[in-house]
Image (spheres, rainbow, N blue to C red):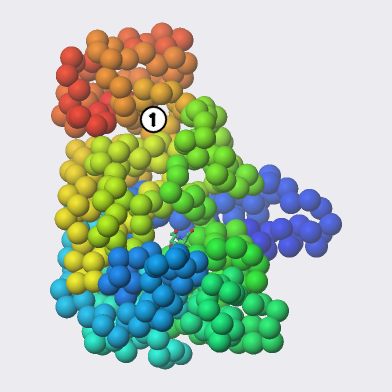
Amino acid sequence: MATYLPNRRDFFRLAAASSCAPLFSHPAWAAIMESEAERTRWYRDAKFGMFIHWGPYSLASVEASWPIMKPTPGGITQAEYEALPQRFDPALFDPEAFVDLARAAGQKYMVFTTKHHDGFCMFDSQYTSYKITNTPYKKDIVKMLSDACHGDDMPLGFYYSPPDMHNPNFRDTSKPASANWEGQPERPQWPLYLQYMQLQLTELLTRYGPVALIWFDGLNDQAKYDGQRVVDMIHRLQPETLVNDRIGVPGDFETPEQFIPTRIPTRGIKISGIDASASGRLQNGVPAPQNFQLWETCMTINNTWAYNKHDRDFKSSGKLIRSLVEVASRGGNFLLNVGPEPTGQIQPEFQERLRAVGNWLTFNGDAIYGTTYGPVQGVAGYRTTAKNKSIYLHMFDWNAPAITVPDFGAKVISARLLAKGMPLTFRQTERELEVNLPAQAPDPNVSVIALETY
Ligand code: FHN
């Protein structure tokens, strides 16, 4: 039986009640940090996950839900969109194949859309008829995938949308979704919608085995969902389930979307668009561990979350490998998305790129999995990650005959090319470390130098 430790919220309540400001040096705070570190350890070590956006919308090659929330002229109508489940029958869906692909990619957890904003449930909920078991396919896809994941020890998380265009207690469904897609908490029915959410989350947390995390997607004005009550209920059902930051209360991890922060995120400073890589140069601050804010960038391989046969703008394998390195070098997780086809297959362009990332990880995974942010930040030519006494230099530029790292505090015992195990000679002074490099970089995308230190 785990001993009860006040969680972060209780700590602040306790401190406030004793009319003193929360003292981060307080023994309770250290205990909270330790208990949080234990809960999130598997997640922090996993580093790389597969996001899956899938539903009847894949039939129409449109984005999930947004076509009815913000319709475009000439686009699919709400009636056409809401009729798609009538012909959704992914006969080629093989959940084991999804898990095998994630494994081949080096992805160590999966997050699946159980219900997107459109309100359609990919699980057999007893609280709605708008669900997968009322389609020609008939089978509970969440059950199939969770069985496959648990059979392969693959942690599975559930994406769940608090916004729900189909539920009449979320919004007045006599009007088009575009009129009130943000929901109507002012209506007397609102508490009934919050109860519906709790009932569905209870189904997801009691019928599908261990749930690694709940990935809420609350969009705006998230306070209307009474998030702390929801999180408390989740932890009563599965205490180890992690929760993200998109239901109006701080979560176990923050979720920058489609961008990688240029700094290492820290507690109390919410990640925002100004942190996006495109907005500015890399920042070189390295926070103390207790100030680090756990985070995860979610990203698409092309530009759409759902399957879209028209979206041919695929990121290259090299770009995806470098994105993974960027994220890991700042202590984050990378949740890379696939949108399966209406047949249940994952398109070859996604498979090719995911397998290429997996191949890179086969030789360089030690420099990613189980690491945290490295001691050198903000240098254009390389990134760093760290794990125990090892420091990894992820070379974006290869400027033989040597690389010089200024102000390298740690005392280096050895240096080697990680992928080939080839020893490298080096020279270290008080001020800098210089590592001699072979003329040819071993990897066309990112070559890793492993440094062992005292
Ligand atoms: O509207 C959703 C979108 O469809 C997708 O699910 C992303 C993934 O994080 N979240 C919302 C946009 O921020």
Any part of residue 150 in sight: no
Give the quadrant of residue 42: bottom left
Any part of residue 23 in sight: yes
Disc 1 marks which amino acid?
Thr
Query: Residue 357 location in percent, x, y?
Result: 23, 44
Residue drawn at x 27%, y 57% as measured from the top left: 310
The total number of labels drawn is 1
Query: Residue 114 location in percent, x, y?
Result: 39, 74
Residue drawn at x 64%, y 83% as measured from the top left: 190
Query: Residue 83 location in percent, x, y?
Result: 35, 83
Residue 43, relative to residue 166: is it above or below? above
Callout 1: helix, strand or loop?
Answer: strand
- Which residue was labeled with disc 1? 384
Residue 19, relative to residue 397: is it above or below? below
Residue drawn at x 38%, y 77% as measured from the top left: 81
Q: 73 or 62, which is in the foreground?
A: 73
Q: Residues within 10 Å of mark 1 (few under 14, many from 20)?
A: many
Give the quadrant of residue 138: bottom left
Query: Residue 165 location in percent, x, y?
Result: 50, 77
Figure quadrant of the C terminus: top left
Q: 253 or 181, which is in the foreground?
A: 181
* Left or right relative to 440: residue 154: right
